[in-house]
Image (spheres, helix red, strand yellow):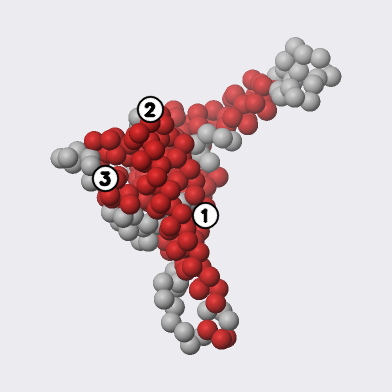
Amino acid sequence: MKEQLYTIPVTDAFHSDCECPLCRMKHELERNAIEYTMGPSYMEDDNRAMTDEMGFCEKHIQDLYGEKNRLGLALMLSTHMQKTTRDLKKLSENPVNGKSLIKKKSDSSPLFEYANKLSHTCFICSRINQTFDRYIDTIFHLYKKDASFSETIRQSKGFCTYHYALLFDRAGDFLSKEQACSFIKDINTVYFGNMERMQEDIEWFINKFDYRYQNEPWKNAKDALPRAVMKTHSSITPDMELL
């Protein structure tokens, strides 16, 4: 199949020899989203309206703070705080919102609902998730249309636990029953096989802390810990970016 533009990030990730191609794709999207947010785009009205509305999650506000554009971050936070304050002031004017002061434990005030919703929205997460969903679509599209892609999956190092489960769960939404069974067989093989490999590496890593093994070679275990973090927690740390 002739490679199309939207397939490139997916096929590149699957050929990258990493512990989870979906983690790699998501990490690339995250870096691009952070760079986009801290670039000239923060001065555009449409983007500023969205950052004012959504804010940033705890992780991504820390990532933004670590970037060089402190003025850009300050400007975004300034208008975001102005909007948040205006909205909360309006909601705080009527504490009970016409209800009895005695309310059910399950009831929440509109003010709390606003703040709670705000704590679960993030401009960067939103950008990442929109594109990542298209990447998931592309994986199943390639599996249906490109006969060689199933072999690409089988030759990969598998997936982290979350992304394995995500692909397992979505297979029936995109593939015929026969195709879904074949796809699940492939991802089962690479996930469980590579989790066994990862377990052997982490066990040997542990052994190397035992004096009886101190003169033994590291084999493939020297970087087993960061790779195990990716496998179990879908997490890429700065030291893992090239894995």
Mark 1 vs mark 3: give the one in front: 3
Residue contact between numbered discs 1 and 3, judged by CB atoms under 8 Å: no
Give SS at disc 3: helix
Position of the N terminus, as image quadrant, is top left
According to the picture, the residue beneath numbered tag 2 turns out to be 46
In this picture, residue 82 sits left or right of residue 108 = left
**Mark 2 vs mark 3: in front:** 3
Vertical placement of 223 versus 152: above or below? below
Q: Amino acid at mark 1?
A: Thr
Residue 3 is left or right of residue 19, and the answer is left
Residue farthest to the front, as pictured: 178
Q: Amino acid at mark 2?
A: Asp
Mark nearer the viewer, 2 or 1: 1
The Cα atoms of the two marked residues, 1 and 3, are separated by 25 Å
- Residue at (43, 58) in percent of width and height: 194
Q: Earlier in the sequence, mark 1 or mark 3?
A: 3
Q: In front: 9, or 2?
A: 2
**Residue 123: image tag:** none
Q: Secondary structure at mark 1?
A: helix
Asked whether residue 70 is in view, the answer is no
Q: CA distance from mark 2 to mark 1?
A: 37 Å
Q: Give percent across and percent down for residue 94.
A: 72, 17
Residue on which the image places disc 1: 232
* Helix, strand or loop for disc 2: helix
Say whether disc 2 or disc 3 marks the residue closer to the N-terminus: 2
Given residues 143 and 138, the one toward you in this image is: 143
Residue 228, placed above or below residue 222 = above
Residue under the point 56% across and 86% down: 212
Q: Measure the C-alpha gap from mark 2 to mark 3.
A: 39 Å
Q: Residues within 10 Å of mark 3 (few under 14, many from 20)?
A: some
